[in-house]
Image (cartoon, rainbow, N blue to C red):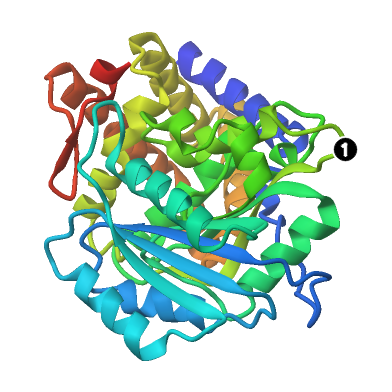
């Protein structure tokens, strides 16, 4: 019981710290302002989209870019990464039927994957090179995924933010699909954990070392990407968006706003997560990578998740059963702080607020996914995504 009491009070202290001294990450308030009709520039933009087996969603994604309400010229380069489901054919049809002079869509084929590159980054690097040939005057690159439906004013808002703050990168965590089942709890929890790991207000402060990005939607100045070493500088990374954010911020010039990372409820992902297994596979792919394949970091993560997320409800219930008012009070206070912190992210994802007290359940499941990720690594089972096997530790 002494251990439970100590964990309960430690959890309460941690949640007080997180709420007060972690940049206010939990407020989920880093949003693009409503874009004005004139973003202050009509700078030319080149969008680069790596795509592998995205036939079901690629037409919606491409048309959302073609239909952007932006006065500047936009060149869209889709690099088909050896798709087997007709992605290239769908994209080519969209280019024929919906392309126009100020919204040129070019479909290119990725070359064979060389050693020490992830497939997505290899396709992205080739898209950046092709964009340099097709749109040499483009000031910005929009690096986006093939499953993103961009709001009509998204590009205008990104450009306005970059110009107003002199940012080298403006990135958005898009709205993830969470309409049913486990995704209603686990997807908002994923966004919450991401914000806690990379506190957006701290990332957005050029004086702070924290850096991160969300790969679904990243607007980057071409010169900033070149200073950072281009896509090649992160070629082996599986968590490539945050790796690129770190490099862009590291190599930002004096006077630059650095990077900005925010949230949106209008630009959205088209990829569904219908069941627990889909979310489990998504997390398992990179969870141990996030911990740098360190057993020590894994142990610390498991202990930390147990204290922060599991100890409060366990202490609250134990205190009520045993009549220990101090134990119950500490547990309930930490649990209430946790639920209060989760509410803004639930609102962002348009989920009912009664899910807030269930964050410990999400914490338990994500801890299990992380442990499973480590077990798969120890068993020598490499990361697999869309039929391609990655072995990042061998490359490094």
Q: Could you tell me if residue 319 is visible in this image?
A: no
Quarter of the view holding residue 181: bottom left
Quarter of the view holding residue 250: top right
The answer to whether residue 239 is above or below residue 43 is above
Q: Residue at 58% of width from left, 27% of height from top?
A: 11
| Quarter of the image that includes the N terminus | top left
Quarter of the view holding residue 326: top right
Q: Position of residue 323 (x, y in %)?
A: 52, 31
Q: Nearer the viewer, residue 393 or 359?
A: 393
Q: Position of residue 346 (x, y in %)?
A: 54, 61
Q: Position of residue 30 (x, y in %)?
A: 71, 55
From the viewer's perspective, tell me whether residue 144 is left or right of residue 259: left
From the viewer's perspective, tell me whether residue 295 is left or right of residue 214: left
Q: Nearer the viewer, residue 242 or 235?
A: 235
The answer to whether residue 166 is above or below residue 75 is above
Residue wearing tag 1: 255
Q: Nearer the viewer, residue 266 or 68?
A: 68
| Quarter of the image that includes the C terminus | top left
From the viewer's perspective, tell me whether residue 15 is left or right of residue 391: right
For label 1, the crowd category at 10 Å Cα-Cα, with few meaning under 14, some 14 to 19 and many 20 or more, is: few
Which residue of the protein is positioned furthest toward the right in this rendering?
255
From the viewer's perspective, tell me whether residue 280 is left or right of residue 132: left
Q: Residue at 56% of width from left, 41% of height from top?
A: 335
**Local secondary structure at mark 1:** loop
The answer to whether residue 362 is above or below residue 57 is above
Q: Position of residue 186 (x, y in %)?
A: 38, 53
The answer to whether residue 328 is above or below residue 184 is above
Which residue of the protein is positioned furthest toward the top in this rendering?
296
């Amino acid at each position: 019981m002494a251990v439970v009491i100590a964990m309960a009070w430690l959890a309460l202290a941690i949640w007080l710290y997180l709420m007060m001294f972690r940049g206010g990450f939990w407020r989920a308030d880093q949003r693009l302002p409503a874009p004005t009709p004139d973003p202050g520039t009509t700078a030319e933009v080149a969008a680069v989209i790596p795509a592998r087996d995205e036939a079901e969603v690629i037409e919606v994604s491409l048309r959302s870019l073609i239909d952007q309400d932006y006065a500047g010229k936009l060149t869209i380069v889709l690099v088909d990464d050896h798709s087997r489901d007709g992605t290239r054919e769908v994209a080519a049809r969209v280019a024929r039927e919906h392309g126009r002079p100020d919204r040129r869509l070019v479909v290119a084929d990725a070359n064979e994957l060389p050693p020490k590159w992830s497939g997505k980054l290899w396709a992205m690097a080739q898209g950046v090179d092709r964009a340099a040939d097709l749109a040499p005057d483009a000031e910005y690159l929009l690096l986006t995924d093939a499953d993103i439906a961009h709001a009509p004013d998204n590009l205008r808002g990104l450009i306005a933010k970059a110009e107003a703050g002199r940012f080298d990168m403006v990135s958005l965590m898009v709205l993830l699909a969470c309409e049913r089942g486990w995704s209603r709890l686990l997807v908002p929890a994923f966004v919450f954990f991401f914000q806690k790991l990379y506190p957006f207000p701290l990332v957005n402060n050029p004086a702070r070392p924290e850096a991160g990005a969300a790969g679904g939607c990243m607007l980057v100045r071409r010169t900033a990407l070149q200073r950072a070493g281009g896509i090649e500088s992160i070629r082996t990374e599986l968590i490539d968006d945050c790796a690129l954010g770190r490099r862009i911020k590291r190599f930002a010039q004096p006077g630059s706003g650095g990077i900005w990372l925010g949230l949106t409820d209008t630009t959205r992902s088209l990829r569904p997560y219908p069941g627990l297994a889909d979310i489990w596979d998504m997390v398992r792919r990179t969870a141990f990578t996030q911990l740098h394949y360190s057993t020590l970091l894994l142990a610390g993560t498991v202990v930390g998740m147990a204290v922060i997320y599991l100890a409060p409800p366990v202490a609250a219930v134990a205190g009520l059963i045993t009549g220990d008012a101090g134990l119950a009070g500490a547990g309930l206070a930490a649990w209430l702080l946790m639920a209060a912190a989760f509410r803004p992210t639930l609102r962002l994802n348009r989920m009912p607020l009664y899910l807030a007290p269930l964050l410990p359940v999400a914490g338990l499941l994500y801890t299990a996914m992380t442990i499973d990720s480590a077990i798969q690594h120890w068993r020598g089972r490499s990361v697999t995504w869309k039929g391609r096997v990655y072995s990042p530790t061998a490359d490094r």
